[in-house]
Image (cartoon, rainbow, N blue to C red):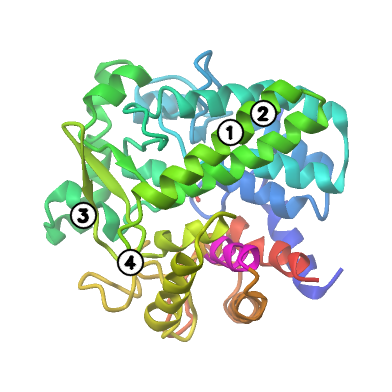
Amino acid sequence: MTDLEEKAYEVLRRNRVEGEGFAYTRPGGRYKHQFFWDSCFHAMVLRHFDTAFAKKELFALFQFQEPSGFVPHLSYHFDQWEAQLFWGRPHSSGLIQPPIVAEAVWAVYEIDPDKQFLQEIYPKLAAFYRFLLTVRDHDQDGLFSYVHPWESGWDQSIEWEFAFRGRQWLTKQWRTRFWLMTLPYRRVDWDQKIMMEQSRFHVETVDGNSLLSVNLAYLTKIADALGKRGEAGEWREGARSVERAVLSALWDGETFSDHYLVKGVHDVIRKRTPVMFFPLLLPSLSKDQKKKLIDTLVGEFLTVSWPIPTAAPAEPHFNPEAYWRGTTWMNVNYYVIRGLLQQGEKELAKDLIELSVRLVARSGFREYYNPFTGEGMGAHDFSWSSLVVDLLKRVK
Ligand code: GLC
């Protein structure tokens, strides 16, 4: 093990939570419960050290899956009264997070080809992705929606200012505002269908849908490995149709943008954030789209010392110290770098990996970083910053 690997594994072990019938890794800092996409990232790193634990962590994600296929973004395996207090329901939140669990399952299986693991987890995965493609694609345009900023995982991104009609002063109270946004959902007992109908925050994101397409492609591989030809065919078609929708509907000729729906009509969120780079992960991206994305990446985002900032420095509300509004996050770097690798941009990908590794080496496994000074911020010993280990393995 390299020094970096040892340190990463140590952080992941320190954040372990094990109890009767469950095991997972805490994100770090003040977060003690299980978060959906965090656990997927943990599994992608843990697979290099301890596949048995990675599998347990992935199973724990489905503990509170509902018959509709819904899987919560936050699972409370203990202190469940907190869920009741915060969300008005037992055990979990009623929101989702970026749907990256199929790729995490496949990543673990690649290193530890355990068919029984695939067999046991497949029905859960299938139900979850069906839920996204049906209930969560309310207007059936091939793109699923988030109904709350927390679902994106980019909590306070400038992307969500539209919900406050640009009133920047609300930023400081966003946590409360966002909690207030959950009240109408409590009133309908978190019925996902009604939530979709009534939500005033109804967003089809570039990153979420690119990740959905990528994950449906991994689900295809899983179904194939299990000999489920028919289902594999359905998932393959699903991956392609989401990909087509992202590459056409969310592209305006120059860039990709999130859309929000107002009374069924699409409106475009014109913000410069790295969500626009997630289509680099898609195999059918055109040459023109790829060129424009890479020019923007280099010209607008790689101008800082420690990329990639979560908002372009030229954005009026860019803030190098604020949560998701300009700070650098390892999971964003992870996907943009994987996108560059997918597009054959190995040199640029390697440069960004090197910078990411250096950032973690000098400032530690922190929750996020100042893109100018490299100073670490937020939680210490933050589990998903260990993703640099997986990135290094991908270019070996
Ligand atoms: C914050 C982040 C979210 C993450 C969670 C736990 O809410 O915005 O993306 O999953 O913390 O790390």
Q: Nearer the viewer, mark 3 or mark 4?
A: 4
Q: Which residue is mark 2?
A: 233
Q: Residue at x 66, y 30 (%)?
A: 60
Q: Residue at x 50, y 45 (%)?
A: 243
Residue 177 is situated, as x and y percent measured from the top left of the image, at 21, 43
Query: In the image, is residue 165 part of the stretch drawn in magenta?
Result: no
The residue positioned farthest toward the front in the image shown = 287
The disc, 2 or 4, on the residue closer to the chain's N-terminal end is 2
Q: Which residue is mark 1?
A: 237
Mark 1–mark 2 Cα distance, whole angstroms, equals: 6 Å
Task: Tell me which secondary structure the magenta stretch mostly adopts.
Answer: helix
* Magenta stretch in the rendered image: 333-343
Q: Is mark 3 within 8 Å of ligand 1?
A: no
Mark 3–mark 4 Cα distance, whole angstroms, equals: 22 Å
Q: Is mark 4 within 8 Å of ligand 1?
A: no
- Circle 2 Cα neighbour tier, 10 Å, few/some/many (<14 / 14–19 / ≥20): some
